[in-house]
Image (cartoon, coloured by chain):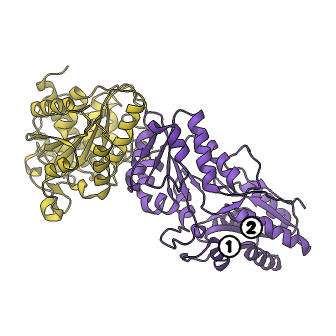
Chain colours: A yellow, B purple
Amino acid sequence: MPNTQQLKDLTTQVRRDILRMVHKVNSGHPGGSLGCAEFFVSLYNHIMEHSTNFNMDGKGEDLFFLSNGHISPVYYSVLARSGYFPVEELNTFRLINSRLQGHPTTHEGLPGIRIASGSLGQGMSVALGAAQAKKLNNDNHLIYSLHGDGELQEGQNWEAIMYASAKKVDNIISTIDLNGQQIDGSTDTVLAMGNIKEKFEAFGWIVIEIEQGNDIDSIISGMAEAKSKTGQGKPVCVLLKTVMGNGVDFMMHTHAWHGKAPNDEQLAIGLAQNAETLGDY
Amino acid sequence: MKTYTYTQKKDTRSGFGDGLTELGRTNPNVVALCADLIGSLKMNQFIKENPERFFQIGIAEANMMGIAAGLTIGGKIPFTGTFANFSTGRVYDQIRQSIAYSDKNVKICASHAGVTLGEDGATHQILEDIGLMKMLPGMVVINPCDYNQTKAATIAIADYHGPVYLRFGRPSVPIFTPENQTFEIGKAIQLTEGKDVTIVATGHLVWEALEASKALYERGISAEVINIHTIKPLDDKAILDSAAKTGCIVTAEEHNYLGGLGESVSRVLAKHNPTPQEFVATNDTFGESGTPAQLMEKYGLNSNAIIKAVETVMKRK
């Protein structure tokens, strides 16, 4: 089991990957990717029981579903650096004939991906289906999912949120990346969603809050608490408070870098703030 | 001329329900989902025998499509059930991303397709669903013609790996295909042999095509009737062979002429053997309330409409 310093080093390297990937093709979504780097690193290197010997059915292991598919850079980087596919393949992000499409897909057979996402609001339903398949298969492993906060504006989420508690789907931990930002501005200015914690609780979910969503120890202890709440007849939601663009000072606390790549100079600044730890691809 | 008779009429949705029941007994991976229409979809017996393999989703079709996609991960074969309108147009993006693009083994089972849903009217009568579904890469589109064939199709699609759209309906229609038939996806069935005109029909219009061929025979016109239960993949060869023989073709379907079977047939003919064709289909319109028979008559979807189309197309040879 890796220690916190190892996970921090990996996170720094993942940040470098994200910046370099989006810079190379001058497109992609660095903001949310950077904000969730610690979460992905912790999930794939400490929290989930999973196998890099990938098969679609994933019986006997925990499964993860990314609903807000635009943060594919962090997903790809962590999958590669966890051993799902060669790290060098990150070089092909968003290029023609690549398995690393702008938004994740199963269509090109990239190991680690079990559903296409990008059109928002669909991932929780899929995760619930996979959770119910686990129950039918008497498989005690868990389903994890990640969703953007702005993504909760999509109505399908609320169908899924209602269903999960009504049907007592208690082998799922759905995490909401609460960074308070979306493309057009803050979530409060675009479409204020009120108290998300109270909304989930009103829909019958157990809610765990992780106040320091960019701190690996906080993530690990919060997710352990979430895991301890599974199997009690209720779905579990984690509200992960993150900073969009975390780790690159000029990208932080703003929606400006939601879907914009850094130029050469900005890349250099970003990389200087995140010195190489495990080696660039 | 080979003629067809029937002793019983039944709705095709019952063929789906009975096929699903049989699958429940023979295939432990088959699961069923419904969005608050189990009676309409005839799913009761499956649910009674397999309560743990049934998921009542409530009135939330988008969530149903996503859950179905998720259930495939772990090896389940989900059959979703609701009306054709709510199975397609309402959830197009969910099907597109979470099922078709994600290559998920989901069977989208759609009842009450077309105008023959009847009195509920246009909000519930989708005439665009074949087009919507056939345009999705990798989606198989099936529209069987009677109870027996719908039952056989339901059973057959469980053994096919990949997304399938299975379309059926509400009204009672003659049962004229064999009981316990083997259903071959993508394989057209020639029902009558003819030399003057080819009639290619799908779904409820197949029986109407047979009725039309009888009347035409009495007038000395020999019609070759082909049952196209699978619109995608289309049996190009069966269509081309028949068109080459008869020199003209009528397509018949309970669907808009835009996007339906007729257009698929046109594409095949235009590419390989341009042939005069007439379309028995709705003319870019919504439906309305009425009895199925009244609606079939008003929207030109019965044997009379097919006979007229045959007369027209034969003049164009």
Compared across the picture, whether B274 is left or right of A274 comes to right
Judge whether B138 appears above or below B275 on screen: above
Q: What's the chain of the residue with tag 2?
A: B
The amino acid beneath tag 2 is Glu
Q: Quadrant of the N terminus of chain B?
A: bottom right
Distance from disc 1 to disc 2, alpha carbons, whole Å, reads 8 Å
**Horizontal side, residue B182 vs residue B157: left or right:** right
Quadrant of the drawing holding the C terminus of chain B: bottom right
Quarter of image, res A64: top left
| Spot occupied by residue B239 in the image (x, y as percentages of width and height) | 75, 59
State whether residue B15 is above or below residue A190.
above
User: Could you confirm whether marks 1 and 2 are on the same chain?
Assistant: yes
Q: Residue A161 vs residue A249: left or right? A: right
Most extreme residue toward the top, as rendered? A1
The label number, if any, that marks residue B301 in the structure image: 1
Provide the chain ID for the residue under circle 1. B
Residue B49 visible to an observer of this rendering: yes
Q: Quadrant of residue A152?
A: bottom left
**Residue B163 appears in the figure:** no
Residue at 15% x, 55% y is A181
Q: Are dots 1 and 2 in contact, CB under 8 Å?
A: yes
Residue drawn at 62 percent across, 45 percent down: B19
According to the image, label 2 marks what residue? B208
On screen, B165 above or below B195?
Answer: above
Label ID, residue B76:
none
Q: Give coordinates of residue A235: x percent, y percent.
A: 25, 40
Mark 1 falls on what kind of element? loop
Left or right of A64, for residue B303? right
